[in-house]
């Protein structure tokens, strides 16, 4: 697996009095850490506000790592779905939930902060993601509310239990026990996780996204949140005419960066 990390100029100039906070950005299906690094245009925002940005991989990789028996791009390598697989043969390598929320931040903390803590990978952190990674961000955020300061998503899969991409992934990684599926599904988590701090989630979706109706269904999250502590705390914005691509993502990255910068105490 690879990981890309962008350290803002404040890190080198040592102009920031407190440790540099981090945004973890989870990518979508088929991506390596390079897609968002090359086409998301987060780096300028990182320099503007003074945060570090981490782009993890989307699955385990390498020899002996099992992938989709049908060799399709929506499962297996490049499609780890940010869950801990419990079903063989995927349970050995596909522990992406554990990896992105715990293992990787701890590894980075040890690697970079040798004597003093200069980059905060553990406490003053936020999470964002796109599509499958938007699902990963929403799900990981709600399951670890005290860990993340804020969460945002671009064209997320909000209800994996009820759409083809999610059903294939959950069946493959978790098996057919639906109670395990519910533990990751944002439309279920809004009902069980209490939003005690009145946190708000920011979501952008393009109205011309080809996956909108079949896979993403973002309004399902608003419906599921009705009558819960998340009602009116999901700021879903439709971007007229935009699709699913990095042209869409990079257009709205500045708004997401500002949103996270506020929650990370940078503005
Ligand atoms: N490969 C698929 C598209 C998959 C796709 O759109 N992946 C999104 C995430 S769900 C992505 O970020 N692709 C890589 C990119 O645009 O650089 C296809 O040919 O239809």
Image (cartoon, helix red, strand yellow):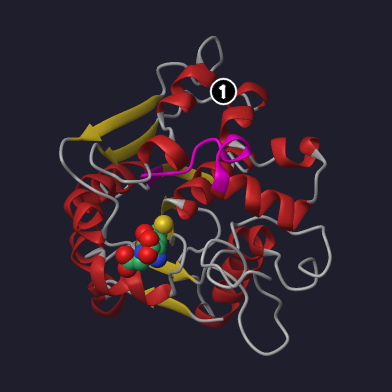
Q: Is 216 contained in the magenta span?
A: no
The quarter in which the C terminus is drawn is: top left
| Quadrant of the rendered image holding ligand 1 | bottom left
Asked if residue 138 lies left or right of residue 249, the reply is right
Whether 116 is drawn above or below 199: the answer is below
Tell which residue pokes out farthest to the bottom in this image.
63
Residue at x-position 50% and y-position 75%: 116
State the residue in front, 263 or 137: 137
Q: Secondary structure at mark 1?
A: loop
The total number of labels drawn is: 1
The verdict on label 1 being within 8 Å of ligand 1 is: no
Which residues fall within the magenta stretch?
152-164
Residue 111 % position (x, y): 55, 82
Q: Is residue 23 visible?
A: no
Residue at x-position 48% and y-position 43%: 157
Asked if residue 24 lies left or right of residue 246, the reply is right
Whether 246 is drawn above or below 171: the answer is below
Residue at x-position 51% and y-position 64%: 121
Residue 16 % position (x, y): 29, 64
Q: Write down the residue under mark 1.
A: 196
Residue at x-position 51% and y-position 72%: 57
- On the image, which quarter does residue 62 sit in? bottom right
State the residue in front, 73 or 192: 73
The quarter in which the N terminus is drawn is: bottom right
Residue 51 % position (x, y): 32, 61
Q: Is residue 217 visible?
A: yes
State the residue in front, 32 or 13: 32
């Amino acid at each position: 697996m690879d990981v890309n990390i962008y350290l803002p100029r404040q890190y080198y100039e040592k102009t920031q009095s407190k440790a540099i906070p981090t945004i973890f950005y989870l990518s979508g299906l088929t991506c390596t850490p390079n897609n968002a690094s090359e086409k998301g245009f987060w780096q300028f925002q990182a320099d503007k506000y003074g945060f570090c940005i981490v782009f993890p991989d989307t699955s385990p990789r390498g020899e002996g790592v099992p992938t989709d028996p049908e060799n399709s791009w929506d499962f297996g390598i490049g499609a780890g779905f940010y869950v801990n697989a419990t079903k063989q043969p995927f349970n050995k390598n596909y522990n992406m939930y554990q990896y992105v929320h715990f293992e990787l931040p701890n590894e980075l903390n040890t690697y970079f902060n040798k004597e003093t803590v200069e980059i905060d990978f553990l406490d003053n952190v936020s999470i964002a993601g796109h599509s499958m990674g938007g699902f990963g961000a929403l799900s990981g955020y709600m399951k670890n509310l005290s860990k993340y300061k804020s969460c945002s998503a671009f064209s997320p899969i909000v209800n994996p239990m009820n759409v083809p991409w999610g059903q294939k992934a959950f069946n493959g990684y978790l098996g057919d026990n639906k109670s395990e599926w519910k533990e990751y599904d944002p439309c279920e988590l809004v009902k069980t996780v209490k939003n005690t701090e009145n946190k708000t989630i920011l979501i952008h979706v393009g109205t011309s996204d080809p996956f909108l109706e079949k896979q993403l269904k973002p309004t399902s999250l608003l419906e599921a949140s009705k009558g819960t502590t998340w009602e009116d705390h999901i700021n879903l914005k439709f971007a007229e005419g935009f699709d699913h691509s990095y042209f869409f993502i990079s257009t709205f990255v500045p708004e997401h960066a500002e949103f996270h910068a506020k929650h990370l105490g940078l503005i």
